Amino acid sequence: TKQLAIVTGASSGVGLYSTQALIAKGWQVIMACRNMEKAFQAAHDLGLPTDAYQIMHLDLGSLSSVRAFHAAFRAQNRALDTLISNAATYLPQLKQPARSPEGFEISVATNYLGHFLLANLMLEDLQKSHLPRLVTLGTVTANSEEFGGKIPIPAPADLGEFQGLKDGFQAPVSMIDGKPFKPGKAYKDSKLCCMMMSRELHARYHEDTGIVFSTLYPGCVAETPLFRNAPALFQKVFPWFQKNITKGYVSQPLSGARVAQVVADPEFTRSGVHWSWGNRQKVGQVAFAQSMSDKATDAARSKELWDLSAGLVCL
Ligand code: NDP
């Protein structure tokens, strides 16, 4: 039988092209998407073979949707070889925080808390596989070890003392550190949380379960719809800037191929690692384990974040 991956947010960008690359490697893919019609159209437009994928409904911003998705998957009684936590929303121009059905700020709810709950629910399904992996999309802007993570626009990722989470993360709280709302920072914070979550999953479960937990930064995939809510001028200039100035630009197919490598290739079976191909792209580049900032590797803080998150998603 074919190996099975679930890709969250497979209706566009990195998730869609990861689906394509995994299918090309002979995998079966469940595309877990909030907009199923859009996912069908995207799969059709790319010419994905219809017997290689299945589309299931998942809105990561809603904890009840995450639980319903998991129940529907569990009912299929299948082993899961890899969960790819990819979906994300980036809303840099919001003036006021938008809220999830549970009342949480929407980018942290979608990008982090939804994946946190999903990962916890899926651990049992992953253990039915021989070589399970849980791969999470990180980003350079959440790692202050690297140049991209030092850029202070609008502010670097910073979770403070988790005051916002301790206060329940409901209105009027909108940021994890409990400080005033900054939408672009909320995205960076959510991605830092995802990277800390992966390390904490490794610390808690790798030895006992054999599941390989890793994160990756595929490069700057400047043309994905992630930037659809950024100012129009930014959307025009950003790909050019990344291609010609920073040389960080990566095409959508290459980003998908990199995710598929981390998911399927034997060179990527180390757990607790953040994979990168560097920030300046060259042909034939090879992945390496990128070191992470203290913010992302402090074990006590990762544990505290875990406990607070478990409370918020009612685990
Ligand atoms: P896209 O906007 O193209 O894709 C995001 C996907 O997430 C879409 O399928 C979107 O669905 C889905 N999504 C958003 N909200 C939800 C939700 N509530 N429930 C379910 N799915 C949802 O962005 P990218 O492909 O660029 O981003 C994918 C991942 O890659 C993200 O984790 C991002 O942080 C990461 N990344 C991206 C980089 C880049 O340069 N683009 C660089 C480094 C990391 P819909 O189609 O319905 O909107």
Image (tube, grey):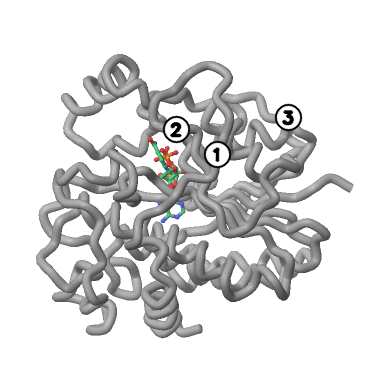
In the displayed structure, 299 sits above or below 36; it is below
Select label 2 or label 3 by which is in front.
2
Whether the residues at callouts 1 and 2 have beta carbons within 8 Å, the answer is yes
Whether the residues at callouts 2 and 3 have beta carbons within 8 Å, the answer is no
Return the x and y of residue 17 as percentages of the image width and height: 56, 32
Residue 255 or residue 100, whichever sits in front:
255
Look at mark 3 in the image and give the residue it sits on. 24
Quarter of image, res 106: bottom left
Is residue 37 visible in this depiction of the protein? no
Amino acid at circle 3: Ala
Return the x and y of residue 43 as percentages of the image width and height: 60, 33
Image-quarter location of ligand 1? top left
In the displayed structure, 254 sits above or below 181; it is above
Look at mark 1 in the image and give the residue it sits on. 288
Return the x and y of residue 110 as percentages of the image width and height: 39, 60
In the displayed structure, 201 sits above or below 303; it is above
Mark 2: few/some/many CA within 10 Å (<14, 14-19, 20+): some
Left or right position of 179 against 256: left
Q: What element carries label 2?
A: loop
Pick whichever of labels 1 and 3 is earlier in the sequence.
3
Look at mark 2 in the image and give the residue it sits on. 278
Q: Which residue is drawn at 63% across and 55% down?
A: 83
Left or right position of 272 against 239: right
Q: What element carries label 1?
A: strand
Is residue 279 visible in this depiction of the protein? yes
